[in-house]
Image: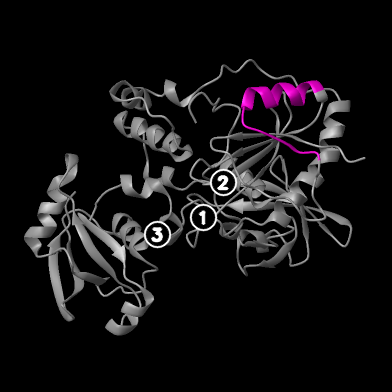
Amino acid sequence: MRTAYVAALAGSVLALSLSSAQDAPEIAWLTDLASAREQARGAKKPLLVVFR
Amino acid sequence: MLGVDLNTYRFDYDLTFAALVMNADGTTYHRFGGRDETSASSRLTVAGLVRVLEAALPEHEAYEKGPKPKREGVAPRTVEQIPTMARRIANKKPDCVHCHTVNDVERELAQEEKRWKRDDLWVFPLPEHVGLKLDSDDVARVVSVTPGSQAAKAGAMAGDVLVTLGEQRILSEADVQWALERADAGPTKLPLVYERRSARVEAELELAAGWKRATALALSWRPAMWGIRPSPGFGGRDVSADEKEKLGVAFGFRVNYLVDWGEHAEDGKNAAAAGIRKGDVVVGCDSKRDFAGHAHFQAWFRLEKKAGEDTAIEVLREGNPVTVKMKVLP
């Protein structure tokens, strides 16, 4: 089972599609940076932060 | 960027898209996102991002299992704490602070405090700046090496796979740029490790004094360009490809403003007095015509022109060539 990321979008919501076969399917798109960081800490998952 | 800790989320703030792959403790494993003068998305590929995400997973697992590095208690620092930004906010609090504003207000503060140097313009050098052309979908892989470049002198060759540069493991162009950004202005040596046919090669990039300096074209997309002087005092929009063809020029922008605001309104008055008019199509300056566009012209003028010298602006006015001679203001 693939390890997923917790993700945060700092700034506006991003319409980013990772729909290829290489997709990491469990990525949870959030908009709150602090919340994402806490979730990542609790789940011991890496954090993807996107600024745009 | 309001409220974002600049000591934790560190990347090229001029970008319109940047991603950080991190641990929740604030450690950044990798960065993704980059651009050049051609467009804001010129160096973004989904395949490249997916590769970074996938390759960083085992790194994260190893980090979680291993002893954590001691993190010094660095206090959070936000854009609001930068005095030049604080003054802007005091005038009117913005709903949103763009990433590039961080660089803008940092530069304004450095200029106010007389510690800003022109070499501070050169940030986050692209891999090509040291001679490395990388695969856009698998950026640790070297596509080509510029002969005579620092990378060539370090022995790198097409087909090599970058492992680390400085202390940064390389999965993206942004990782390379981060390692180069962190390196001294020179002279210095930056450790480079790469793999060739599964063999590990340890080398060094030898970086001479001033190695970060690049070209006006490379600078032309960065907002910092607009804050340096001298300035021509006018600007405009690139004419279309069709219009360039009709005019028989490879480069041209139509003047649609002469600066008549702010502390540098004298630049616009100077240009107007010299004879620049709205509607003129600028096609060259001092016999140079190979500009990529208006922004390139602006960056070139600011980097190359010296206060007090005479300059000749070549324009087309109602289709007729006119040369406007203008003194460059400090």
Residue range (magenta): A26-42
- The amino acid pointed to by label 2 is Phe
Q: Are marks 3 and 2 in contact (CB under 8 Å)?
A: no
Along the viewing direction, whichever of B167 and B265 lies nearer the viewer: B265
Give the chain letter at badge 3: B
Within 10 angstroms of label 1, few (less than 14), some, or many (20 or more) residues?
some
Q: Earlier in the sequence, mark 3 or mark 2?
A: 2
Instruction: Tell me if I can see residue B273 in this picture.
Output: yes
Residue visible at 41% across and 29% down? B95
- Reading the image, the residue beneath label 2 is B17
Q: Are marks 1 and 2 in contact (CB under 8 Å)?
A: yes
Instruction: Tell me if I can see residue B285 in this picture.
Output: no
- Reading the image, the residue beneath label 1 is B40
User: Residue lying farthest right?
Assistant: A1
Along the viewing direction, whichever of B135 and A17 lies nearer the viewer: A17
CA gap between label 3 and label 2 equals: 22 Å
Q: Are marks 3 and 2 on the same chain?
A: yes
CA gap between label 1 and label 3 equals: 17 Å
Q: Position of residue A1 (x, y in %)?
A: 93, 40
Q: Earlier in the sequence, mark 1 or mark 3?
A: 1
Within 10 angstroms of label 2, few (less than 14), some, or many (20 or more) residues?
some
Residue visible at 51% across and 23% down? B3
- Reading the image, the residue beneath label 3 is B216
CA gap between label 1 and label 2 equals: 8 Å
Q: Secondary structure at mark 2?
A: loop
Q: Position of residue B181 (x, y in %)?
A: 56, 43
Q: Are marks 1 and 2 on the same chain?
A: yes
